[in-house]
Amino acid sequence: MTLDEIQEIITKNLFTNVFQPIYHLPSKQIVGYESLLRCSLVKSPDLLFNYAQQQGCIHELDMASISNSFKSFYEYYKTVNSSELFLSVNVYPSTIAVPFFPQFLEKLVKKFSLSNQQIVLEVNESEPLKDLKQFIKNIVILKEKGFIIALDDFGRGKHSLYTLLEVEPHIIKLDQYLAKDLSKNLKKQKILSYFLDYFNDSENIIILEGIETEEDMICAKNLGIGYAQGYYLAKPHMLSISVCI
């Protein structure tokens, strides 16, 4: 895909965002939504971001997706009138490292009458950390401003432990691999118990991704997983659709 084609997708908004609910398992309540980009012009969003990365415009696509996510979330949020719902957006390290990224986020928050504390930034590890100094500098700024930092797909990326130590996220999202057949896999259950013992406290939250069966949801809940998302709970959808379990 050429640079011009990607720029056209961005400037003409030839994409949309769907939202997957994140649940508090004990109460079965939706606490937030993760925004996911979709574009009919490519086979998968990952492929589109790969093209954008190759063409050097991944931060433009990232920011366009984030802007549209804020807009869609606000339209829904103002109808449900719940200050407790949060919006979680995926963002690449190179986008976070853009010097004006914190200011970009604050303008969006103000424009759509949200609060910094409602916004979760899921750090995507599918690209190497190149400008580590500026990346960490902006992470510190974002934390000081009240934005919530999450480490996405923990356990899959080859830099996971490194990023965990450098970023010190508020939220750790465990990769869906750990959720698959969880009820039948004692090793995965032990690993989840370890993460809960080590990370799940008043300063950190663990979210398990990829819950696809009732058995795995019950197992996760019994292990002490407080927050989860996955196809069994709800598939990504437009926010005008109400989903509950």
Image (spheres, rainbow, N blue to C red):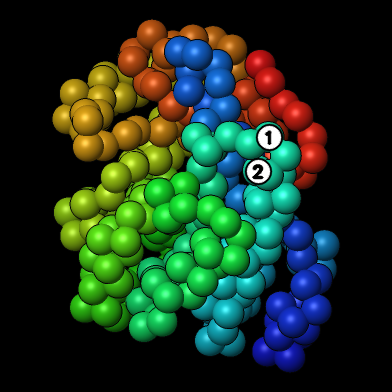
Q: In the rendered image of this protein, does residue 140 appear above or below residue 53?
A: above
- Kind of residue sitting beneath label 2: Tyr
- The three-letter code of the residue at mark 1 reads Val
Instruction: Where is residue 166? Give x, y as percent.
Output: 19, 60
Q: Report the quarter where the C terminus lies.
A: top right
Mark-to-mark CA distance, 2 and 1: 5 Å
Task: Residue at 38%, 8% (x, y): give it.
Answer: 222
Locate residue 26, reporting x and y percent: 45, 13
Residue lying at 57% horizontally and 56% vertically, measured from the top left: 113
The residue identified by callout 2 is 77
Q: Secondary structure at mark 2?
A: helix
Position of residue 92 relative to residue 86, above or below, is below
Taking 154 as reference, is 201 left or right? Answer: left
Are the two marked residues, 2 and 1, in contact with CB atoms closer than 8 angstroms?
yes
x 59%, y 12%: residue: 214
Decide which of 116, 47 is in the foreground and name it: 116
Q: Mark 1: give few (<14), some (14-19) or many (20+) Cα within 10 Å.
A: few
| Residue beneath disc 1 | 80
User: Image quadrant of residue 37?
Assistant: bottom right
Tell me: 139 left or right of 147.
left
Local crowd size for mark 2, using a 10 Å CA cut-off: few (<14), some (14–19), many (≥20): some
